[in-house]
Amino acid sequence: MDTIASLFSFITTPVSWVIVQFHTVYGKIFGPDTGWAWGLSIVSLVILIRICLIPLFVKQIKSTRAMQTLQPEMKKIQERYKNDKQRQSEEMMKLYKETGTNPLSSCLPILAQSPFFFALYHVLNGIATGDTIGVINESLLASARKAHIFGAPLAAKFKDGSATVQALGATVTDVRVVTAIMIIMMSASQFYTQRQLMTKNVDTTVKTPFMQQQKMLMYVFPVMFAVFGINFPVGVLVYWLTTNVWTMGQQMYVIHNNPTPGSKAQAAYLERLTKHVMNHGKARKRSERTIIKAIVAKGRDRNEFERKFINGLNKAGLAAQADGTVIQSESQAAVQTEDGSPASGATPKRQQPKRQSKSQRQSGGPKAAGETEASEPTSLSKSDEPEAAKPAAKNQPGSANRSKAQSGQRKGPQRPKSPSKK
């Protein structure tokens, strides 16, 4: 570890300087030799580093989502060139180049944070051994060795013997209890962060090996933190616990406001967004307009949750635009009052004509309202015809056709059913 720490010695001085500046501020509040002053200095160092890493974190999110999108294409390449590893690698690199994706981007925050971690470890290890490092002089070194967090010195480790711990002014029981609790909290926060990512923010419509890898890391990382944690000083455990809690909160914010497409988090977000837009009639936040713009741009490639969101807006008389805004739709549905009647200004629903029966079609339709039986002279006049005229009507040409027409068939000579029967 000393060899690795020496490689990052160029950053040891800046890290120690930042800790000393924070210690100067907190020392005036809690006292220069207290564990609160030195512990909060480490926590503030973590927050400062993570704020500087926010751009890399955003890039990590975009890279991770791009990798999730490319998993089906990568699987096809692996199956197509499973016997040619060189061609498989070339096609993978070509796919990354065409889509602008970098697989290492998801590791950037961890890689960028590593130098600060090793520099802090080197500083705290120097406090434990009584060596001045960076801008920490003799007086600051003596103050740091007196600082205790819940009875455990900053430089003490879980595996330290009684002699080493007594030299720092503490007992083995206090050190092991405090470090054990911090290691458990550190591992639990890491597990919850990874589980939250797998259960809420992963596209469930695509089953890829990437998901299996993430699921495996969900159990591997906490075990790694527990194994390595027993070799970390208390100050480093404070640093690592703080950065895990920051990562967990940062990821919760991203999942809540910018979830992965196709995930359960997106379904919950779009449901909230639908209610919000319906209540206000528009998208008020810039982040909301950005997501609506992306959904509209997908067109027919929208997933189930996105189609449900667009359909919900249409039913409410709203339409999502290409720039992410929401406007009133021209084909707005009719608004009804509580008693079911159309509201003022709403277009009434067109009534479909009632289908007539066969007897009504033959008799010329149903009687009009208020029409009496005396308004049917045709049937009476036919009944008053002399009996002698009836046989003559039967002998007239086309009488058979007319009788058939009265039964609902087409008038005129009928076409034979098939040429063979002519």
Image (cartoon, rainbow, N blue to C red):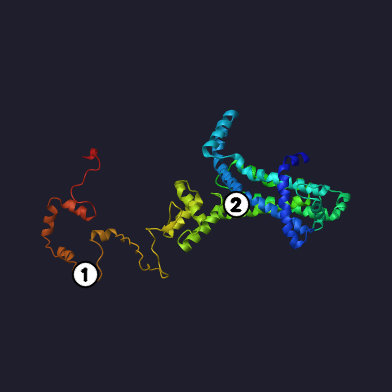
Question: Residue 86: x, y in percent?
Answer: 59, 28
What residue is disc 2 on?
200
User: Can you tell which of label 1 and label 2 is closer to the viewer?
Assistant: 2
- Res. 3 mark: none
Residue type at mark 2 is Lys
Residue 396 in the image: above or below residue 353: above
Residue type at mark 1 is Glu
Question: Residue 268: x, y in percent?
Answer: 55, 56
What residue is disc 1 on?
373
**Label 1 environment density (alpha carbons within 10 Å; few <14, some 14–19, many ≥20):** few
User: Which element is circle 1 on?
Assistant: helix
Q: CA distance from mark 1 to mark 2?
A: 74 Å
Residue 154 in the image: above or below residue 417: below
Residue at left offset 54%, top offset 56%: 269
**Label 2 environment density (alpha carbons within 10 Å; few <14, some 14–19, many ≥20):** many
The residue positioned farthest toward the right in the image shown: 163
User: Split into 4 quadrants, where in the image is the N terminus?
Assistant: top right
Task: Compare marks 1 and 2 and give the one earlier in the sequence.
Answer: 2
Question: Residue 338: x, y in percent?
Answer: 43, 70
Q: Is residue 409 left or right of residue 307?
A: left
User: Which element is circle 2 on?
Assistant: helix
Is residue 36 visible in the rendered structure shown here? yes
Q: Is residue 120 left or right of residue 93?
A: right
Q: Nearer the viewer, residue 357 or 262?
A: 262
Residue at left offset 66%, top offset 44%: 112
Residue 361 in the image: above or below residue 206: below
